[in-house]
Amino acid sequence: MGIEPFGAFLKKTNFMDIFKKIKTFFSEVKSELKKVNWPTKKDTIRDTFTVIGVSVVLAAFLGGVDFLITALLREFVM
């Protein structure tokens, strides 16, 4: 038993079945997207500012740590 060549797959495959499966797939995707609990505009704005705020605080902290380590290395190593 092995992997069959792509040509053999094409001979056995009914192309109408492929299009039917693609249509079914997209109709199922559409159905699932209707079930999604999308965030409100207010939630999205709040979450966006939260991410920006945390990023700024983390960047400031890491910048401070980097500055401190650089200063210590200059003082004691160089």
Image: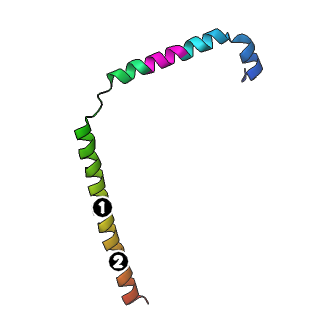
- Residue at 46%, 16% in the rendered image: 27
Marks 1 and 2 close (CB-CB < 8 Å): no
Alpha-carbon span between mark 1 and mark 2: 16 Å
Q: Secondary structure at mark 1?
A: helix
- Which quarter of the figure is the C terminus placed in? bottom left
Seen in the picture, residue 29 relative to 40 is either above or below; the reply is above
Q: What residue is drawn where x is 26% and y is 56%?
A: 53
User: The magenta stretch spans which residues?
Assistant: 23-29
Residue 28 counted in the magenta span: yes
Three-letter code, disc 2: Phe
For mark 2, give the secondary structure: helix
The residue carrying pointer 2 sits among few (fewer than 14), some (14 to 19) or many (20 or more) residues within 10 Å by Cα, namely: few
The residue at 40%/87% (across/down) is 74
Q: Is residue 59 left or right of residue 17?
A: left
Relative to the observer, which residue lies in front, 21 or 71? 21
Give how far across and how far down residue 2 sits, in percent.
Answer: 73, 23
Q: Please say if 23 is above or below 69.
A: above
Residue with the mark numbered 2? 67
Residue 74, compared with residue 53, is above or below; it is: below
Q: Which numbered disc flags the more N-terminal residue, 1 or 2?
A: 1
Q: 10 Å neighbourhood of mark 1: few (<14), some, or many (≥20)?
A: few
Q: Is residue 18 magenta?
A: no
Give the amino acid type for the residue marked by disc 1 in the picture: Val
- The numbered disc on residue 56 is 1
- Looking at the figure, which quarter contains the N terminus? top right
Q: Position of residue 37 (x, y in %)?
A: 29, 28
